[in-house]
Amino acid sequence: MQREVILQKIEMAETTDELSGFLRQWRSELGLSHLVYHAVSVPAFEKSNALLLLTYDDAWVQRYVQRDYFQIDPVVRAGRAGFLPIDWMRLDHHTKEARHFFAEAASYGVGRHGITLPIRGPAGERALLTVNANVDDEHWHRWRFNYVHEVQLLAHFFHDRAMPVDPPYVSIICGPFRFNAFFIDIAISIVSSQVVEWRPCN
């Protein structure tokens, strides 16, 4: 898709459902394994991780939330403090915790290569857009050279649109089905009295 078409689709999205659908379409257009938008901190919300739009397998999302991997994910930890793109291969993979995390992610279909783009919003919000691919090194370096700057620019437009349409509760969206309720033990233990919107992937 051309930049103008992407911007038009982002602007036309009026719900998180539509943004999630666009994310899946954009992922396919870019030839990626996954795309993830993660609103890490939004001052208007009391809780962190206010919005997750992603294309990961629902089993991995369930395990990630259940284990509260927000706290140990090397990508999220680096993105909270950084401003520059974060290439996963440059993160520390040598600790036992990091090795276990990336190995477990790979077992659920998360690609070995990824780059996470930190976003800082005008109201102090912080978000991350992650692209993920299960390709060889040469293919990944070529993709980065051709697309990363364009995606970095468009990530800010996506974030700008996601903020007005996001409902005032924790949202986790990755597929075509919806369950609006406390998500059994996961929601109770992770987000306490908030409502969780869970959307399993196909």
Image: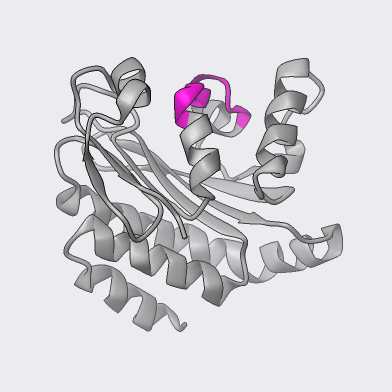
Give the camera-side residue of 68 and 82: 68
Q: Residue at x 42, y 57 (%)?
A: 155
Can residue 32 be found in the magenta stretch? Answer: no
Q: Residue at x 32, y 52 (%)?
A: 159
Give the camera-side residue of 120 and 77: 77
Left or right: residue 201 compared with residue 173? right
Give the camera-side residue of 125 and 55: 55
Q: Vertically, is 47 above or below 18?
A: above
Q: Vertically, is 76 above or below 16?
A: above
What colouring does the structure picture have? one colour
Query: Is any atom of residue 116 visible in this view?
Result: yes
Provide the major secondary structure of the magenta segment. helix
Location of residue 183 in the rendering, given as x and y in whole percent from the top left corner: 30, 31
Location of residue 154 in the rendering, given as x and y in whole percent from the top left corner: 41, 63
Left or right: residue 131 compared with residue 46? right
Residue sitting at the far front: 184
The segment highlighted magenta reads: 65-74
Q: Vertically, is 149 above or below 167?
A: below
Q: Residue at x 62, y 54 (%)?
A: 132
Query: Is any atom of residue 79 visible in this view?
Result: no
Q: Residue at x 74, y 25 (%)?
A: 100
Can residue 66 be found in the magenta stretch? Answer: yes
Q: Vertically, is 128 above or below 65?
A: below
- Name the quadrant containing residue 93: top right
Location of residue 127 in the rendering, given as x and y in whole percent from the top left corner: 39, 40
